[in-house]
């Protein structure tokens, strides 16, 4: 289908991931749960919170759904295709359940929140429906479902941040981890379902964030990615001293955990990223030189309809500002092709903006109308599917060219690479990333290196997606 055109789709294009079995601090578990996650990093991070809550209530994880007492799907609603993937997956579980009548099936996350009780009518095999702010009540809902009743909690909260819950890191490489710093979104981009599925924006207690990052570092992790839909609007008031913690302050606090702990963040809304954040990045070498700055469209007219609150020129000035403070900063973006009323000229504006920003990487989508959003209520989804498809193809082709050009410019440079594990293609090579978030592959040789080590690598080749090099000895 059309969506498969996206060369890098970071959410629903990714197959659902199952967690490997946990051996959690020697505890005996009464029952087994299996969890599969779809959507953005926030959802994957939430599944780790759910795993923690379930572990505390006698459920241990299994990587094999056929032996699970409880099967959970953490779902995404961002595009129609994401929801279709979940429905297809439920059909597979239907067959398993036919042979294991006692098995319970729960739907979590954004699709649960969007459809609420309706989910139970549409998908008869589902026993439990839980929205993103109600995971603490999951054990109670499971108990209710065990008595044969359907159990639903889709209440959104103004203050739930799960700050006190220590996520269970399952299926982790032991080197990089995601840390959720806020929940919800107040932005109301007209195409987007997230404000409806995730509720109001709220920031997590900064002290608990720093504690979690310190704990990860002490366990050997070398990189944390601070997560939120709009991290630059992070704001938390420390009531002990009356001090307000902004995102720039928080970045500094996390950077100070240890100079050898890399700090990344996602996502920045162009309207909110401040000079203070850029200056903080410049001050600390361990804050990675990489910003994901979703533009969505290069046409001011379309941006206005999208309610993104910036113009093409304003965005361009932001890119210039970033590069003047951080000349070696990597940049990536999200682009939507074929939004309501988009003309050929608007589309050309998107292509020319991509050339202007010279993104290292993009996540590219075609517009998918989501029920209840401002765009669905106000505008007509009037760009024909084949036009959306062709425009998306042009965007993908351009990005492939830009990525290759940008990677070629790195040939001859030396980067500090954090080793994350074996290269996907060969166990004789390491795979890691540089500060700019580019994947770097290099031969292991006999240098005695390990996962989690930093290495200086000189780049001597590349593809559009990967830099290839050799360690500098
Ligand atoms: N909070 C992030 C984005 C979250 S959703 C931000 O504001 O940047 C990730 C991406 O999905 C968005 O940036 C957008 O490009 C895309 N997206 C969201 N809604 C969409 C829709 N209805 N159709 C197609 N793409 C969409
Ligand atoms: Fe959606 Fe916009 Fe919020 Fe991102 S900032 S989650 S695109 S409403
Ligand atoms: Fe999808 Fe919800 Fe994330 S809609 S992209 S899982 S916030």
Image: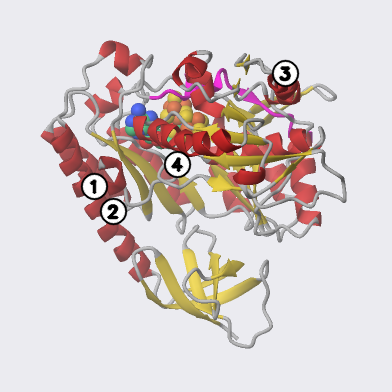
Image position of 449 with respect to 86: above or below: below
Disc 1 or 4, which lies upstream in sequence?
4
Image position of 340 with respect to 31: above or below: above
Q: Quarter of the image holding residue 403?
A: bottom left
Residue 228 visible in the shown view: no
- At which x and y percent is residue 372? 38, 14
Image point 27% across, 48% down: which residue? Answer: 5
SS for callout 3: loop
Q: Quarter of the image holding residue 311?
A: top left
Contact between marks 2 and 1 (CB within 8 A): the answer is: yes
Residue that label 3 marks: 147
Pick the quarter of the image with the N terminus. top left
Q: Quarter of the image holding residue 271?
A: top left
Q: CA distance from mark 2 to mark 1?
A: 6 Å
Disc 1 or 3, which lies upstream in sequence?
3
Residue that label 4 marks: 11
Closer mark to the observer between disc 2 and disc 3: 3
Q: Is residue 76 magenta?
A: no
SS for callout 1: helix
SS for callout 4: loop
383 or 311, which lies in front? 383
Q: CA distance from mark 3 to mark 4?
A: 35 Å
Closer mark to the observer between disc 1 and disc 4: 4
Q: Around disc 2, counting alpha carbons within 10 Å, would you say few (fewer than 14), some (14 to 19), or many (20 or more)?
A: many
159 or 231, which lies in front? 159
Residue that label 2 marks: 399
Residue that label 1 marks: 395
Give, as a single range, the part of the protein colored magenta.
192-207
Indicate if the residue with disc 1 has its beta carbon within 8 Å of ligand 1.
no
Indicate if the residue with disc 4 has its beta carbon within 8 Å of ligand 3.
yes
């Amino acid at each position: 289908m059309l969506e498969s055109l996206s060369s890098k789709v970071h959410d629903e294009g990714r197959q659902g991931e199952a967690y490997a079995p946990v051996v959690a601090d020697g505890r005996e578990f009464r029952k087994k749960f299996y969890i599969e996650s779809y959507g953005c990093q926030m959802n994957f991070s939430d599944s780790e919170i759910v795993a923690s809550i379930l572990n505390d209530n006698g459920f241990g994880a299994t990587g094999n759904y056929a032996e699970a007492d409880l099967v959970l799907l953490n779902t995404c609603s961002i595009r129609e295709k994401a929801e279709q993937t979940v429905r297809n997956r439920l059909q597979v579980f239907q067959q398993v359940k036919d042979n294991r009548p006692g098995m319970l099936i729960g739907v979590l996350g954004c699709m649960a929140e969007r459809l609420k009780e309706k989910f139970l009518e549409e998908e008869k095999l589902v026993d439990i429906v839980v929205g993103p702010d109600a995971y603490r009540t999951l054990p109670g809902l499971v108990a209710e479902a065990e008595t044969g009743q359907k159990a639903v909690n889709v209440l959104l909260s103004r203050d739930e941040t799960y700050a006190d819950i220590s996520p269970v890191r399952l299926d982790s490489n032991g080197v990089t981890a995601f840390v959720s710093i806020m929940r919800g979104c107040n932005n109301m981009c007209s195409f987007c379902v997230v404000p409806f599925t995730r509720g109001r924006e709220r920031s997590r207690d900064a002290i608990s964030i720093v504690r979690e990052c310190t704990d990860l570092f002490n366990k050997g992790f070398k990189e944390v990615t601070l997560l939120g839909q709009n991290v630059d609007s992070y704001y938390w008031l420390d009531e002990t001293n009356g001090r307000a913690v902004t995102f720039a302050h928080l970045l500094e606090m996390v950077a100070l955990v240890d100079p050898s702990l890399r700090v990344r963040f996602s996502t920045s809304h162009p309207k909110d990223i401040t000079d203070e954040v850029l200056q903080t990045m410049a001050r600390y070498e361990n804050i990675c030189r990489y910003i994901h700055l979703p533009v969505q469209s290069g046409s001011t007219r379309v941006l206005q309809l999208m309610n993104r609150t910036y113009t093409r020129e304003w965005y361009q000035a932001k890119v210039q500002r970033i590069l003047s403070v951080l000349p070696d900063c990597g940049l990536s973006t999200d682009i939507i092709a074929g939004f309501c009323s988009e003309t050929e000229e608007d589309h050309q504006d998107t292509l020319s903006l991509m050339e202007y920003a010279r993104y290292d990487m993009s996540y590219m989508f075609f517009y998918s109308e989501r029920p209840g959003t401002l765009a669905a209520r106000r505008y007509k989804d009037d760009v024909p599917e084949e036009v959306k498809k062709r425009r998306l193809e042009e965007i993908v082709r351009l990005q492939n060219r830009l990525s290759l050009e940008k990677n070629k410019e790195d040939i001859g440079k030396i980067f500090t690479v954090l080793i994350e594990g074996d290269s996907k293609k060969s166990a004789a090579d390491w795979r890691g990333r540089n500060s700019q978030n580019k994947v770097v592959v290099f031969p292991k040789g006999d240098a005695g290196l390990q996962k989690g080590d930093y290495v200086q690598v000189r780049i001597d080749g590349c593809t559009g997606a990967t830099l290839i090099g050799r360690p500098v000895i």
